[in-house]
Image (tube, rainbow, N blue to C red):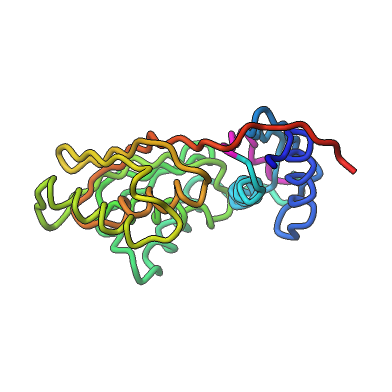
Amino acid sequence: MVLSDEVIKKRVVDELYWDTRVDASKVLVKADNGRVTLTGTVPSYSARVRVGEDAYRIPDVAWVDNRIIVQYSPTAPAPGGTDIERSVENLLSADPDMDPTDIRVSVQDGNVILKGSVDEYWKKWEAGRIARRARGVRDITNELTVVPTLSIADKAIADDVQAAIERNRNVNIEDVDIEVEDRVVRLSGSVTNREARQAAVEAAEFTTGVVDVIDDLTIITPRRVESTVC
């Protein structure tokens, strides 16, 4: 039985108030046909991300639209742009998996802008995850490009992505269509849950030679039925 929107909303709210990493007192939750919209304010960018992750953990949530605004406390104001920039640079330099040589960091009104290049697609998003830990960050604009050190043919990339999906127990390769053009992977088809979708996307993201991933996958769940909150 698929959870009703009423039950989904209650479970998301319960999850947020359970999570001690999140101050959910100013977060509003709406659910519509399995799509959850989050609004309100939180005191850090990391908290904003955690709220979205909490919502995705609830069964039958097909999509999360995170519109939460980061609002720092007046008693502990956010640092200035130069301090944020330096903090992000230090965090990138300290990470053993990242080479920040070709990454440029700038900050505008708390929005961290990442430019330059990395040599693997997953490192683009890892740089964003690292940057969000810096105090003062309100948003992240990730403009990093991927410049692989090896030139790999589209057919070889497609074969590697397919093999990675076939090895993964969370997704059925029959549900996923893979197209590769100019080292850009496009995934389409219908999967049954978010875990399957994430598994397919990660299969593309972690493959050598990929410069971009376009996620056109949809999540198809059984017909929604109404139930009441007890």
Is residue 188 shown left or right of residue 178?
Answer: right
Q: Percent position (x, y) of residue 151?
A: 9, 52
**Image quadrant in which the N terminus is located:** top right
Q: How many marks?
A: 0
Residue drawn 37% across the image and 45% down it:
114
Please, is residue 93 above or below residue 49 in the view? Answer: below
Name the quadrant containing residue 166.
bottom left
143 within the magenta span: no
Q: Out of 49 and 54, give the one closest to the viewer.
A: 54
Residue drawn 74% across the image and 57% down it:
19
Q: Out of 143 and 209, give the one closest to the viewer.
A: 209
69 within the magenta span: yes
Q: Out of 92 and 38, give the one closest to the viewer.
A: 38
Q: Percent position (x, y) of residue 230?
A: 90, 43
Looking at this rendering, what residue extends furthest in the bottom direction? 96
Q: Percent position (x, y) of residue 141?
A: 42, 39
Is residue 201 shown left or right of residue 81?
Answer: left
Q: Out of 119 and 31, give the one closest to the viewer.
A: 31
Residue drawn 78% across the image and 57% down it:
18
Please, is residue 34 above or below residue 17 in the view? Answer: above
Looking at this rendering, what residue extends furthest in the top direction? 32
Name the quadrant containing residue 164.
bottom left
Q: Percent position (x, y) of residue 170?
A: 45, 57
Residue drawn 35% across the image and 71% down it:
96
Magenta part of the chain:
62-73
